[in-house]
């Protein structure tokens, strides 16, 4: 199984969870909800950093898996 590259929000959520696990954290759903709220409040310049990281991850993913094509299974 080849994992899909992470998008900008997923990268933000990973960082958000790392920052929050040092303090009290709730269940995964509530952490995701708070991360979504924080993402919407984030200035465009901060979001641009995550979008750039996502593009870099997509570029590395294309190099590592050149024949990859997303094919969801039902």
Image (cartoon, rainbow, N blue to C red):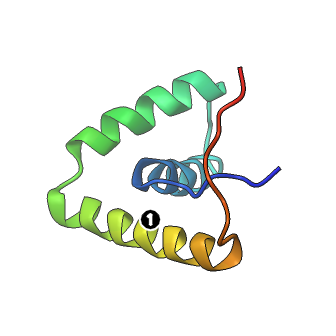
Percent of width and height locating residue 53: 43, 71
The residue most toward the right is 1
Q: Total of numbered circles in the picture?
A: 1
Q: Residue at x 62, y 80 (%)?
A: 63
In the image: residue 69, left or right of residue 2: left
Viewer-proximal residue, 22 or 74?
A: 74
Q: Quadrant of residue 40?
A: top left
Please give the residue where the numbered disc 1 appears in the rendered image: 54
In the image: residue 2, left or right of residue 51: right
The quarter of the picture where the C terminus appears is top right
Q: Residue at x 54, y 32 (%)?
A: 31
The residue most toward the left is 44
Label 1 element class: helix
Q: Residue at x 17, y 56 (%)?
A: 43
Percent of width and height locating residue 57: 53, 70
Percent of width and height locating residue 38: 33, 41
């Amino acid at each position: 199984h080849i994992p899909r590259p992470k998008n900008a929000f997923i990268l933000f959520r990973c960082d958000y969870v790392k920052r929050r696990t040092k303090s009290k954290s709730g269940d995964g759903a509530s952490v995701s909800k708070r991360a979504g709220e924080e993402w919407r409040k984030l200035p465009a310049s901060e979001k641009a950093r995550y979008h750039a990281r996502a593009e870099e991850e997509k570029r590395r993913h294309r190099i590592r898996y050149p024949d990859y094509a997303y094919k969801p299974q039902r």
